[in-house]
Amino acid sequence: MEVEARFHGRGGQGAVTAVQLLASAAIAEGRYAQAFPEFGPERRGAPVRAYLRISDRYIFRRDPVREPSAVAVLDPGLVLVEDVLAGLRPGGIAVINTRSGEVAAKVKDSRPDVDVHVVDAEAIAMEVLGRPVVNTAVLGAFIKATGIVSPESVRRIIEDSFPGRLAELNWRAVEMAMGSVKRL
Amino acid sequence: MLAGLQRGARERAVWRRAGLTTNYAVAFAVKAVDVDVVAVYPITPQTTIVEKIAEFIHGGELRAELIHVESEHSALSAAVGAAATGARTFTATSSQGLELMHEVLHIASGLRLPIVMAVPTRALSAPISIHNDYSDIMNARDAGWAILIASTAQEAYDTVIQAYRIAEHPDVQLPVMVAYDGYLMSHTLEPVELYREEHVREFVPRRGRRNVLDVRSPITLGAFATPDNYYEFKYQQEAALRNVEGVLREVEADFAARFGASYGPLEAYRLEDADYALVTYGGAATGNARVAVDMARERGIRVGLLRIRLYRPFPSAPIITALAGVKAFAVIDRAIAYGSPAPGPLYKDVAAALYMEGLTVPGISVVHGIGQRAMYVEDFYGVIKMLAEGASTDKVLFLGLRE
């Protein structure tokens, strides 16, 4: 398995769409991928987990990812209420949406053995989309941090998945996040 | 894995490879077979199938009548009416929706109507759960429908296409359910190879059906039957359902020639020399069990996997052949048959099939993934170890249950 990732978000932030776009991009590259959500109650605001596996071979296992090689956090508030890095492998990658140095430091201090990347996805989403839908910005930071799929594949999948102008704006959010994500 | 000829056929047949959820893959299959009527009522996790079909109809990609109804009872009733006129008909539901259809399930099979229904399976109330298990499909297993259970999005796509050929076959003329894991498959995006629609339509040609409602040539369907003839109708229905296994093999041979894929009524993995066997159905149980089998094999345990794809009619003969040589097996059920001799519905079928053949292979009835309680590869490995160590005399195991 090339990557096993877990995305943490809240209902409405687009965590499920983010892993689906990444899986679709990997599939478009001729690889195998699996993206699936773990819902609690289906409503806006409820914590949501979404899982992603990418491999050069057919993926048989369909269990939740317990020991991810990468984690992404769409809602910085979740860092305070759950262990978003649970099971993250040593040397694994964490991508956190936050503008708060405090949240970033808390994450880094809790796991000095992992590679933490931060991005202010909310600012990007507000500037580009005018709404705090942070998934495509976090996705941009994630592909920059992990290199798991090529930006070009992501761009094509975004063009296939969003109508006209929305595709353009979401791709801009990806590019901005790729440019501004910082490794701690 | 594919023979050369089949690979060539597949290359010609595949239109594109895409990342799709199983629900979307099913919607693409429904479009490819060019259905005439889709009657639906929304229920999660089924809803995204018919949302996608509605998009296809709206966009002019599928010319079909989409009938919105006020309940699942009405959805299947509308499908019965449409199929009775000879229309190619599709519906889909889950959980409580399938329960509400129950009365009409028997009418559809009794009237010998070749409806195809997708069932992303879901737990039953109460308490309310939107999550996956197979309680819904198990309650419908004796309603006279053929039931196929898919384990990947690709297989669900292929199976819906095959299901129309089976349902409309002159020796069958029965409705078919295509079931798969709700959420764990219905909402999981994975690679699917979609076929060129002209190839699919050649595979599922429209042949005029006999005994359809037609004002120019009136007939009566579903009339009152007296004790003098009801039994014969029901016997014919049972005989037709039993034809499905042979028809499936015939349909799959043609499918393999055209699309380079086939699955059979069941799939055996590393069973040839196996001392132990896991028996599963659906996506998550099968996929995780398969990885566990590989883990155990690496550690020297000779174990294999038997995945049941055709659940009704029950393919007893190949199951007996597959299990006759093992020292012990475990059936992983995703539903509870409350108060039965064993809690696992499939276990009971397997045990009965073996008993009817005079075989007494030791077996364990394992229940797992109820209401989508997480099923990990390690859980299945634990069952294999239990079989191999032969230490436990338990015949029943509720796996993943909090103590």
Image: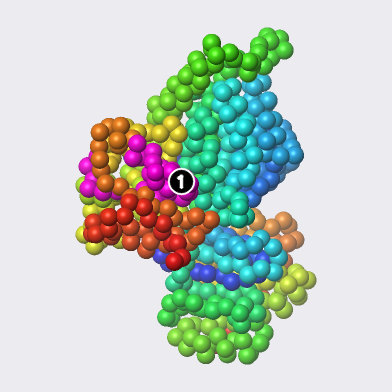
Percent coordinates x, y for residue B182 in the rendering: 55, 50
Is residue B132 visible in this depiction of the protein? yes
Percent coordinates x, y for residue B240 in the rendering: 47, 22
Percent coordinates x, y for residue B314 in the rendering: 40, 34
**In this picture, is B105 found above or below B154?**
above
For the C terminus of chain A, give its image quadrant. bottom right
**In this picture, is A21 found above or below B59?**
below
Range of the magenta residues? B324-352
| Label 1 environment density (alpha carbons within 10 Å; few <14, some 14–19, many ≥20) | few
Q: Judge from the rendering whether residue A133 lies leftward or rightward of residue A103; answer left or right.
A: right
Identify the element where label 1 is drawn: loop
Residue in the image at 72% along x and 56% along y: A163
- The answer for which chain carries disc 1 is B
Disc 1 marks a residue whose amino acid type is Gly
In the depicted view, which residue is nearer to us: B110 or A4?
A: B110
Residue in the image at 69% along x and 41% along y: B41
Q: Which residue is mark 1?
A: B339
Q: Judge from the rendering whether residue B207 lies leftward or rightward of residue A77; answer left or right.
A: left
Q: Judge from the rendering whether residue B198 lies leftward or rightward of residue B368; answer left or right.
A: right
In the depicted view, which residue is nearer to us: A52 or A144?
A: A52
**In this picture, is B195 found above or below A157?**
above
For the N terminus of chain A, give its image quadrant. bottom left
Q: Judge from the rendering whether residue B231 lies leftward or rightward of residue A130; answer left or right.
A: left
In the depicted view, which residue is nearer to us: A43 or B210?
A: A43
Is residue A54 visible in this depiction of the protein? no
Residue in the image at 59% along x and 17% along y: B208
Q: Is B75 inside the magenta-drawn segment?
A: no
Residue in the image at 61% along x and 52% along y: B126
In the depicted view, which residue is nearer to us: B386 or A75?
A: B386
Q: Quadrant of residue B73?
A: top right
Q: Is B325 inside the magenta-drawn segment?
A: yes
